């Protein structure tokens, strides 16, 4: 299986900050990398697909980048509703895998 | 609007079976692959199984292969997860999700609210 490693595992930031989360794949996954947001008690929500494409309805302060094995999720001008857990996911292989998650907390 | 509604969760003893259902509406069900993804309490997301749009292809995580079976009923717009030989480590919230298409290019674009499975003696 392709292993996905996110960093950091947790992050503290303030409203208005800019934060970046990274995700590394254990092998080349081209652009088959997606980012999800999960708020407590809620289902995951797709934010970014194909590494850098913004899902419909997602605010433009979210952006993604990278290809191959190294990817980033950047959130500009953090809003109170952005404090949640973020997961990357690869769908390059049929047996897709998720990163372990990054918990974004209010400082 | 797209809706996915899971049901069938509950408390079950180790070694027993349970069948989860996911009722889909608001889109052309027969055109989309579907997935089950689970999340153990306080843990991350784990992909469980997928089924192609027409039900001809099915894939499973190694952790459930041989014990879980995914299926779909296009006439009822429902996807199922038959879980046999349940283990304590199968305890989790189980989510149904729609595949966005493009052989994985678009990720999983819609998710249900989840149904909780607890395996305990």
Image (tube, helix red, strand yellow):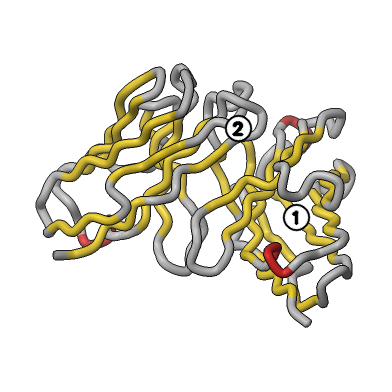
Residue A94 higher or lower than B41, as above or below: above
Depth check: B2 or B13 in front?
A: B13
**Horizontal relation, residue A89 to residue B81: left or right:** left
In the rendered image, residue B68, in percent from the top left (x then y), is placed at 82, 51
Image quadrant assignment for residue A54? top left
Q: Which residue is mark 2?
A: A1
| Residue at left offset 66%, top offset 28% | A94
Residue B12 higher or lower than B105, as above or below: below
| Residue at left offset 42%, top offset 46% | A87
| Residue at left offset 33%, top offset 29% | A71
**Horizontal relation, residue B116 to residue B55: left or right:** left
In the rendered image, residue B118, in percent from the top left (x then y), is placed at 70, 74
Q: Secondary structure at mark 1?
A: strand
Depth check: B8 or A28 in front?
A: A28
- Asked if badge 1 and badge 2 are on a common chain, one would say no
Residue A40 higher or lower than B102, as above or below: below
In the rendered image, residue B57, in percent from the top left (x then y), is placed at 82, 29
Q: Chain of mark 1?
A: B
Q: Which residue is mark 1?
A: B23
Structural crowding at the residue carrying mark 2, measured as other residues with C-alpha within 10 Å and reported as few (<14), some (14–19) or many (≥20): few
Depth check: B102 or B83 in front?
A: B83
Image quadrant assignment for residue B54? top right
Quadrant placement of the C terminus of chain B: bottom right
């Amino acid at each position: 299986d392709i292993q996905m490693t996110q960093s950091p595992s947790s992050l503290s930031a303030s409203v208005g900050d800019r934060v970046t989360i990274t995700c590394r794949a254990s092998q080349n996954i081209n652009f088959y990398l997606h980012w999800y947001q999960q708020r407590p008690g809620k289902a995951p929500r797709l934010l970014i697909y194909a590494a850098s494409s913004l899902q419909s309805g997602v605010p433009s302060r979210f952006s993604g980048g990278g290809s191959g094995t190294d990817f980033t999720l950047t959130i500009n001008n953090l809003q109170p509703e952005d404090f949640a857990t973020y997961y990357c996911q690869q769908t390059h292989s049929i047996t897709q895998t998720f990163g372990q998650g990054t918990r974004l907390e209010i400082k | 609007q797209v809706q996915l509604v899971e049901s069938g969760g509950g408390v079950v003893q180790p070694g027993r079976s349970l069948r989860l259902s996911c009722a889909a509406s608001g889109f052309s069900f027969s055109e989309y692959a579907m997935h089950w993804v689970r999340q153990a309490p306080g843990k991350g997301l784990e992909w469980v199984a997928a089924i192609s749009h027409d039900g001809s292809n099915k894939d499973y995580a190694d952790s459930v292969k041989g014990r879980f079976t995914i299926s779909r009923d296009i006439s009822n717009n429902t996807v199922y997860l038959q879980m046999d030989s349940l283990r304590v480590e199968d305890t989790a919230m189980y989510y149904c999700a729609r595949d966005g298409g493009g052989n994985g290019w678009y990720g999983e674009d819609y998710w249900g609210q989840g149904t909780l499975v607890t395996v305990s003696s």
